Amino acid sequence: MIWRSSFLPVRKSSCLSEISTGKAYIHGHDKEGHPLIVFNLRLNFPDESDLDEHVRMSFWWMQQAIASLPPHKSKFTLLVNRIDSSHRNANVEIIKKVLAIFQDNFPERLHRCVVFPSGLFYLLWKVIQFFIDKKTREKVKMAFLLPGVQEYIDDEFIPVEMGGKSEYQFNVDDFQDPPELDLTLSSVDHLQP
């Protein structure tokens, strides 16, 4: 909770270079109506990124997702697009740090995380999963084929390069700092997941 009280809300200006890469954005929703954050792993270059700025960017997008929640929802879905990515696009330290802060500060905001294509990431997942609590671990779905993604997300929101129909092009100016909001679940316990 110390991280949350010290650093939130995260402002766009504090992580603009990471946001501007287009590695993450919100577009559409899953089949259950949860806002969809798309993370394009191929645009992530950990050796060229500042770890703290990457963490702030992750939280800035989480704030965006929470601000865009429909009135009856309290969680968001994450789609990890691994098309054209390689080992140089992943960083275990970033993954562990972001997951730890999310678990400690926002344990119930993630509805589901779909990873496609799973491929070699599945092997990395076998190691990383032990740093994640069981409840969160069960929300991660490895999709080896497109139907594994389509089970949770309609084609209109799955990027074309993944086999879907979404031709959305990220534009950093489409997103502004969300209004100050209560990022905890205490005020939304009565809502559907």
Image: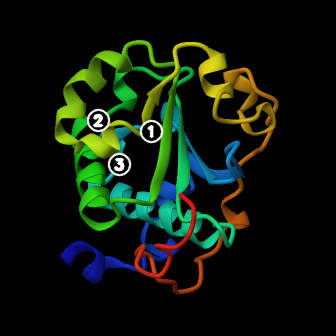
From the image, tell me which residue sits under label 3.
Answer: 49
From the image, tell me which residue sits under label 2.
Answer: 91
- Sequence order check, earlier mark of 3 and 1: 1
Q: Amino acid at mark 1?
A: Asn
Question: Residue at 23% of width from left, 32% of height from top?
Answer: 128
Q: Amino acid at mark 2?
A: Asn
Tell me the crowding category of disc 3: few under 14, some 14 to 19, or many 20 or more residues within 10 angstroms, Cα based. Answer: few
Cβ atoms at labels 2 and 1 below 8 Å apart: yes
Above or below, 55 relative to 144: below
Residue 75: percent from the left, percent from the top? 53, 59
Question: Residue at 19% of width from left, 77% of height from top?
Answer: 2
Cβ atoms at labels 3 and 1 below 8 Å apart: yes
- Sequence order check, earlier mark of 2 and 1: 1
* Inter-mark Cα distance, 3 to 1: 8 Å
Question: Residue at 44% of width from left, 76% of height from top?
Answer: 183
In the rendering, which numbered label is found on residue 120? none
Outermost residue, bottom side: 180
Residue 152: percent from the left, percent from the top? 64, 34
Q: Does 13 sit left or right of 31 as displayed?
A: left
Count of marks, rendered view: 3
Cβ atoms at labels 2 and 3 below 8 Å apart: no
Q: Can see residue 95?
A: no
The kind of secondary structure element at disc 1 is loop
In-front residue for pair 136/192? 192
From the image, tell me which residue sits under label 1.
Answer: 44
Q: Does 12 sit left or right of 139 as displayed?
A: right
Residue 153: percent from the left, percent from the top? 68, 36
